[in-house]
C-alpha cells in the first residue's frame, strides 16, 4: 500500500460530505481485499487524478477508481465507483443489482440522499479485484 495516499492529502481536496463518502468507499475496498486470500496485494495510487486501487503480485483484478460524481462546481455528495470500460463488470452488476444507477459501461453511481449499499459494493469490489483470476477460471 502506498503510504502517501493513506493520508488525507488526496481526500482532503473534497468537500466534507464527499470526503466522508469516499473514505467509506475506500474502507470497503480495503476490507474486501483483505478478506479475500486469492486477491493480489493491493496498491493505492492516483489514476486520472482519482483515488485508485489495483492488484499487484499477482495481478488478479482490474483497477477500481473512486471519485465524486457530477460536474465540477456542483455541490453534491454523490460519488461513483469506476472500473475499466472494456471489462464486463458493469454489465454483470446491472443484472445483479438493477436497483442501482450505472453510467455506461464504466461506473456505478451512489447518490448522496441514500446510504451506500455496503453489501452490493463489497460484492462488486470483490468481482473487480478478482476479474482476471475469475476470467481465467474454467
Image (cartoon, rainbow, N blue to C red):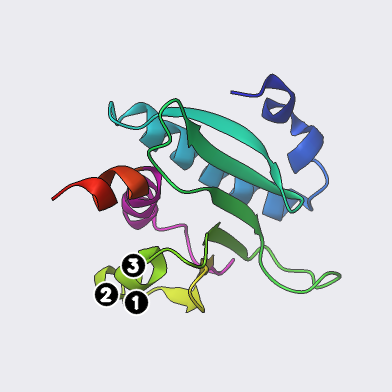
* Residue 123 lies in the magenta-colored region: yes
Q: Are marks 2 and 1 in contact (CB under 8 Å)?
A: no
Residue 23, visible in the rendered structure: no
- Give the labeled residue for mark 2: 95
In the picture, the disc for residue 93 is 3
Picture quadrant where residue 4 is located = top right
Q: Which residue is mark 1?
A: 99
Which quadrant would the N terminus be assigned to in this image? top right
The answer to which of 40 and 44 lies nearer the viewer is 40
User: Which SS class for mark 2?
Assistant: helix
- Tell me where residue 97 sits by quadrant: bottom left
Q: Position of residue 92 (x, y in %)?
A: 30, 68
Q: Is residue 137 above or below residue 102?
A: above
Q: Residue furthest right?
A: 73
The reply to whether dot 2 and dot 3 touch (C-beta < 8 Å) is yes
Mark 1 → mark 3, Cα distance in angstroms: 10 Å
Residue 77 colored magenta? no
**Mark sitting on residue 127:** none
CA–CA distance in space, label 2 to label 3: 5 Å
User: Which residue appears at 71% of the width and 72% of the height?
Assistant: 70
Q: Main secondary structure of the magenta part?
A: helix
Q: Which residues are magenta?
A: 110-129
Q: Earlier in the sequence, mark 1 or mark 3?
A: 3
Q: Residue at x 44, y 25 (%)?
A: 57
In screen coordinates, is 1 left or right of 31?
A: right
Name the mark nearer the viewer: 2 or 1: 2
Amino acid at each position: 500500500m502506498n503510504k502517501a495516499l493513506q493520508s488525507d492529502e488526496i481526500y482532503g481536496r473534497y468537500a466534507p460530505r464527499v470526503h466522508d463518502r469516499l473514505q467509506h468507499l475506500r474502507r470497503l475496498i480495503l476490507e474486501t481485499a483483505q478478506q479475500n486470500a486469492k486477491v493480489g496485494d493491493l496498491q493505492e495510487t492516483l489514476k486520472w487524478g482519482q483515488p485508485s486501487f489495483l492488484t499487484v503480485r499477482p495481478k488478479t483484478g482490474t483497477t477500481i477508481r473512486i471519485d465524486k460524481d457530477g460536474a465540477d462546481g456542483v455541490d453534491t455528495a454523490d460519488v461513483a465507483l469506476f472500473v475499466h470500460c472494456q471489462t464486463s463488470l458493469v454489465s454483470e452488476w446491472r443484472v445483479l443489482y438493477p436497483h442501482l444507477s450505472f453510467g455506461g459501461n464504466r461506473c456505478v453511481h451512489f447518490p448522496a440522499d441514500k446510504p451506500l449499499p455496503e453489501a452490493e459494493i463489497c460484492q462488486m469490489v470483490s468481482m473487480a479485484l478478482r476479474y482476471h483470476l475469475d476470467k481465467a477460471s474454467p
